[in-house]
Image (cartoon, grey):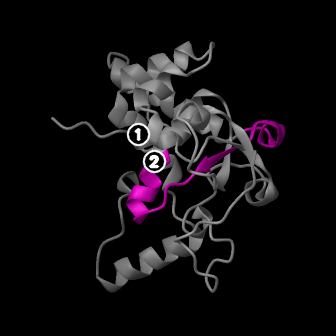
Amino acid sequence: AVTFLPRPGSSEAPQADDPVASAVAALDASIAAWLRPQQTACKERGFRFVVREGGFGSTLNSLVKELLWALLHGRPPLGEALSERSGSRRAQHRLRLVEPAPLELFRNATTCANASLECFLQPLTNCSAESRTSQRGMAHGGRWLEVVSHEEVLAMAPPGTEPLRADIAAAGRFALVSLLLASLLRPSGSVAARLRAVRSSLGWPEADPRAA
């Protein structure tokens, strides 16, 4: 039988005798809380992820390890940054203070002047617009994604994250990646409107909210 995960943020309670579903629900709640920080946390612990741009899907997938690291370290993700793709493997792990930077490939000044993922998606956090677009934040080196594995990201988790890591282990990697991408892949208002218009023109029925 195929078991579908509850939509992130849903109120569906897992079965008490299903430890995997319970872990998924707990992990979902942890991700939701992480993405709704106090504004002081945005200013003091803001994190900028180095985007590896390619196709739209591969660009988003490149953020999974960055978002997992930020979740484990309790750093609110502010948005994109550019970082030099040079230096030793060890240097890529050193956090550095970087400026926000526009995307290089996904640019369209006529429809979205700031050239960020927010051209297509809702803001990832409730940090202020000023923080997301203008504030400097800590970031890894530009080759960090190339020198770190999923397992190493988990091993880097600081003390005090044992309950979160236990939920991640019990939920499994598929659920973890699905929940992280679900938190990211929420269409902006303009994109959602265009998707509805295309769906209507094709005569497709309205999407089931659980599958949206």
Instruction: Name the image quarter holding the C terminus.
Output: bottom left
Residue 33, horizontal then vertical, whole percent: 64, 35
Q: In the rendering, which numbered label is found on residue 181?
A: 2
User: Which quadrant of the figure has residue 7?
Assistant: top left
Q: Residue at x 75, y 60 (%)?
A: 133
When the figure is inspected, residue 147 is found, relative to residue 189, above or below; the finding is above
Amino acid on which disc 1 is placed = Val
Mark 2 lies on a secondary structure that is helix
| 23 displayed left or right of 124 | left
Q: CA distance from mark 1 to mark 2?
A: 6 Å
Amino acid on which disc 2 is placed = Leu
Q: In the rendering, which numbered label is found on residue 177?
A: 1
The magenta region covers 37-63
Tell me if residue 60 can be seen.
Answer: yes
**Residues at circles 1 and 2 in contact by the CB criterion of under 8 Å:** yes
- In reply to whether residue 61 is colored magenta, the answer given is yes
